[in-house]
Amino acid sequence: MPTAISLVLSRLGDFFAHPTPWHRRLWNIGTSLALREVLEYADACLSEAVSRTEGLKYVVATAQREVARDPGVAPLSNEIGTCLGRLDVRSRSDIPVAARDELNHLVSRVDADYLDNWCNAPNASAVEFPARAFASHLLDLGFSPDHLHRWITKVGLKITNLAELATATRDMVAGMPAKTFDVFVPCAAPYKKPDTNTGPVNWLEGQEAAHWLRQHLPNEETRRHAGGFLLQVECRDPWSAVEAARATVARADARAKVGQPSNDGIRLDGWARIAGNKRDYSIRPTPRQVEIGSLIRQDAVYRFDQGLPTATDDALELASYMESPSEGAAVTGGWSAVEALLIRPGEGSYHTAADRLASLVTCSLPRAELTSLAFRHMKKADDSLAASLSSAHSNYEKVKLVEDHLRKGNRLDLAEGSDLAAQDRIIEIIKDPAADLNRIKTYVTESLRRLYNQRNTVAHSGSLRSAALSATTRTALSLVGAGLDRIVHAQLEARGDLAPLSLVARAETELRLVGTPGGRRLSSLLE
């Protein structure tokens, strides 16, 4: 049997790996960032950038739950809870500025002591919460998934309990404060280049760039280039530095396109180098794993004669912006797709679209997980179940076989810790489906509500500086993709006759019935 800490380490690997499917990804932000989100929303209400306090009340409730259960804030939890309670108000005029300022001070205390508190926390058998707490905290600190995946793969071999993981995490963070990186980003296309020194962002002509590369790299760079940007960025690790450089060049490209509208722009060569570093870095936006795979599985990418209503096609076009390099465009496009399909004309409470999509995603999760487990068992095992899975005519038959196998108290033949942890989660849902699925829906709803809030910040305040914007694109957009995938699949099956809100009604009804005599199987919640 795998140990709890081995499963925690496997889950951290899931959270830091780019190809992880939506149902095993990280959906939440860390406790510290959740508290900063409260501060940000309180400030927006106080400045009248936000007209009502419903959003503030929601982020306060989310933060209260996280604070109550997170060992990283345990010594301050009562005081933080008191401050949060004072900020749970009905109108902007009721917001006590003193409580906002006190919470701001407490957040600085949380940032300083969070990992130390985890080092002193008692060891427990829990898997999901510790893994999600560590992963979200590290990502919120600005570490890149690439660095964290390499780090956990290396140190995980020596870790035997949660205290050792907390100590290793604390030491890694302390040893990697933010520092300045010099990043060279070659460009493939000519355009109007800066004529003078521009501070932390400078243009190097071809010969200048070649000279800089010779002087500042420990190994030879032989690829051709026509010059490029040299940027100074302050980050935690080299991969985050390359991403910060890419984002800065993307902003320059946006200025170039609106400054003198034309077909010219900044085209990157796809690689970057860092002074003093022999590694070759790809330069690309961090993948968000937005996947509406039903379009491929049901051969519908080029089908425009039947299956998908015009409204769904319009929503898919909006959803395509979720893979935009611009975080603002990603959250705006993603939320617009959700709202377009899941809000009735005349409805004013637009946040309910997040709640409705969360019901679809929650009903989809068991089947997605059972599908993964079915194929893992088929690949490794040579038993009667594997034979039955191989001969099953549909994916639906496969997941029913796996669900029945687990309901009888059996286990699958699995090798990877990620799969073993997933099996444990499914078994827990089978034992108490109502409680577990409602808990999952709470997490998904919080992530999608955050997307709604961030979209409002971008669209109504014109700001891309929110503390939670990057975390929102990291956590929420793959969930939007999963929900849209269910809508597309159902509509293709029904030849376009099933409205998205009818599918939502099905999901919400089955979630209320689950665990009762009238409840459906986990694999059939959306059938």
Image: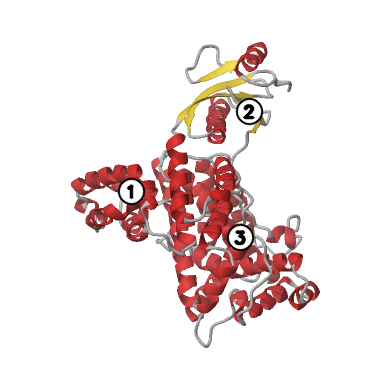
Which part of the image, by quadrant, shows the C terminus? bottom right
Label 2 neighbour load within 10 Å: few <14, some 14-19, many 20+: many
Label 1 neighbour load within 10 Å: few <14, some 14-19, many 20+: many
Taking the spot 67% from the left edge, 71% from the top edge, the residue there is 412
> Residue 499 location, x and y as percent?
59, 69
- Indicate the amino acid at tag 3: Gly
Query: Image height check: is 359 above or below 260?
Result: below
> Residue 40 location, x and y as percent?
33, 45
- Indicate the amino acid at tag 2: Ala
Q: Pointers 2 and 3 in contact (CB under 8 A)?
A: no
Q: Pointers 2 and 1 in contact (CB under 8 A)?
A: no
> Residue 453 location, x and y as percent?
41, 51
Q: Nearer the viewer, mark 2 or mark 1?
A: 2
Q: Pointers 3 and 1 in contact (CB under 8 A)?
A: no
Which secondary structure lies at badge 3? helix
Query: Image height check: is 216 above or below 115?
Result: above
Taking the spot 27% from the left edge, 44% from the top edge, the residue there is 104
Which residue matches tag 1? 41
Q: Mark 3 or mark 1: which comes first in sequence? A: 1
Which part of the image, by quadrant, shows the N terminus? bottom right
Q: Which of the 4 image quadrants contains residue 208?
A: top right
Q: Is residue 440 left or right of residue 92?
A: right
Q: Which of the 4 image quadrants contains residue 272?
A: top right
Q: Nearer the viewer, residue 105 or 475?
A: 105
**Residue 11's disc number:** none
Which residue matches tag 2? 272
Query: Image height check: is 249 above or below 305?
Result: above
Taking the spot 52% from the left edge, 29% from the top edge, the residue there is 248
**Residue 417's disc number:** 3
> Residue 405 location, x and y as percent?
66, 79
